[in-house]
Image: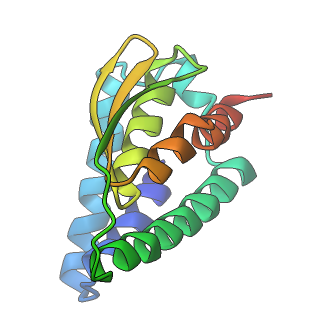
Amino acid sequence: MTVLLAAAWILWSGFFTPLLLGLGALSCALVVYLSHRMHLFDKDVYALRLSLRLFRFWAWLAGEIVRSSLEVARVVLSPRLPISPTLVEVEATSTHPVDLAILGNSIILTPGTLTLNIEGQRLTVHALTRQGAEQLLAGEMDRHVSALRAG
């Protein structure tokens, strides 16, 4: 977990001086240590350990982010501005809070969609276009998130 946090921090911060790299590594280790002491890691969270499934999910999500970015750019740059703001309720297959958080955050990371609320297994989502809403309702993102914790 510490290595994963440190890698994300290095990639996203853009700072590569020895002092900042050391402080970043220290803060990542501190977060993991404190989380462990607070018993925030239980056997269910460990099921979502760093694995090939997680890397595949990140690659798939990155592709979705790029695809959605291009779609939103096309819509926004079109002279007709063909938006059709839509609210939908997406039913998640999983009941686990970690899965619901990953699904909600994955939706937020995808341009043109925004998770407004999570209640039970139901996520209320705003989509810029009806097509974007229909893609969420098709359940592909939910299937990918559910596959993270599967066997």
- If the image is split into quadrants, where does the C terminus sit? top right
x, y percent for residue 105: 37, 43
**Which one is in front, 133 or 37?**
133
In the image, residue 24 sits, relative to residue 87, either above or below, namely: below
Residue 137 seen by the camera: yes
x, y percent for residue 13: 26, 75
- Horizontally, residue 114 falls left or right of residue 70, namely left
Residue 11 seen by the camera: no
**Which one is in front, 33 or 49?**
49
**Which one is in front, 71 or 151?**
71
- Looking at the picture, the colour scheme in use is rainbow
- Horizontally, residue 95 falls left or right of residue 31, namely right
Write down the quadrant of residue 138 in the picture: top right
> Which residue is at a point 61% across and 20% down the rendered structure image?
93
x, y percent for residue 134: 53, 42
In the image, residue 124 sits, relative to residue 128, either above or below, namely: above
